[in-house]
Amino acid sequence: MDRDLAAARDLAADLAVRAGRLQIERRETLRVGAPKAHANDVVSDVDIASEKLIVEAIHAAWPDDAMQAEEGHGRPGTSGWSWVIDPLDGTRNYISRTGPWSVCIALYEGDDPRVAVVHEPVAGETFSAIAGGGAFLNGERLTVTGGPTLDKALVGVSFQPNPATKERAGKVVRELLPVCGDIRRLPAALNLVYLAASRLDGGLALDTNLWDIAAGALIAREAGVVLGGRGDDFTTELTIGAAPDLWPELSKLIRAGEG
């Protein structure tokens, strides 16, 4: 089945902006629900409203597509295309007002990512990519080249805040922090797109879900970021990203830290 990928990207970008606007408008009146998988896995009524907005609009445009959505609005499909949606990546930052968050939408054909959008509402930044067509920030192409040495590198760190993953993250950070320039903890999608924009030189994400990284990973790769995990490809268990010159040293260090 053919698909107009530019039209899919444009719709995803429009929906991400609309969801981001809703999140800003409703921040003063949000209601936080019961934790999901663990005490730090929080969700608000704004997460749910944002996902509903995105899912309903995509379903109206492509009713036969499947959807994987974090807050339970997913549905099966018959077209061979599937949308992977995180309506609010960084809910804890959003609720506590301690950092950035984003809206993430990716489109897959089978197992292959084809379109990605990550929108940061406060900064008004929309990162996007079409497979094979490059990565963009608000319409301007992003290209990663080179990278600093590890001792000067700024590295993003993302991880699920459950007890087991925090233990894993602590081991990696103990290896990384003394030898890199500095680290920043970020939601996974922004970690990846900030790599694409060369704001970070390297990054790692531990125990994510597909909706956390699907959009950001395509954008990062299209910008020239090297991505991997324990093997040649990244997984939700371990995602490592770096500028090309930094990749050999950073990936070796992180994999050693994972032991």
Image: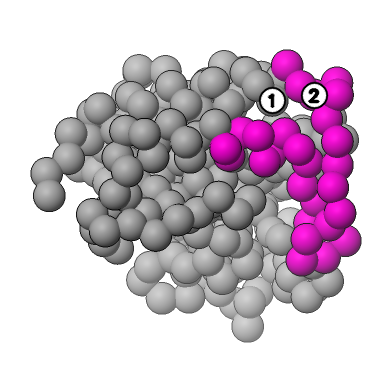
Contact (CB < 8 A) between labels 2 and 1?
Answer: yes
Q: Which quadrant would the C terminus be assigned to in this image?
A: bottom right
x and y, in percent, of residue 21 in the image: 62, 18
Q: Which residue is mark 2?
A: 27
Q: Along the horizontal axis of the image, is 193 left or right of 2?
A: right
Task: Check the image and report above or below for 133 versus 64.
Answer: above
Q: Amino acid at mark 1?
A: Gln
Q: Secondary structure at mark 1?
A: helix
Kindly indicate the quadrant of the structure image that contains residue 228: bottom left
Confirm whether residue 132 shows in the render: yes
Q: Residue at x 86, y 42 (%)?
A: 32
Mark 2, other Cα within 10 Å: few <14 / some 14–19 / many ≥20:
some
Task: Check the image and report above or below for 5 versus 43.
Answer: above
Q: Along the horizontal axis of the image, is 117 left or right of 99?
A: left
Q: Marks 2 and 1, Cα distance to the nearest angstrom?
A: 6 Å
Task: Check the image and report above or below for 7 versus 167.
Answer: above
Q: Residue at x 78, y 41 (%)?
A: 44
x and y, in percent, of residue 17 in the image: 52, 21
Q: Residue 40 in magenta?
A: yes
Which residue in the rendered view is the most extreme toward the left?
A: 2
Pick whichever, 119 or 148, lies toward us: 119
Mark 1, other Cα within 10 Å: few <14 / some 14–19 / many ≥20:
many
Q: Along the horizontal axis of the image, is 41 left or right of 73?
A: right
State the extent of the magenta-drawn residues as a range: 25-52
Q: Residue at x 51, y 70 (%)?
A: 252
Q: Which residue is mark 1?
A: 23
x and y, in percent, of residue 229 in the image: 47, 69
Q: Along the horizontal axis of the image, is 201 left or right of 111?
A: right
Q: How is the image coloured?
A: one colour
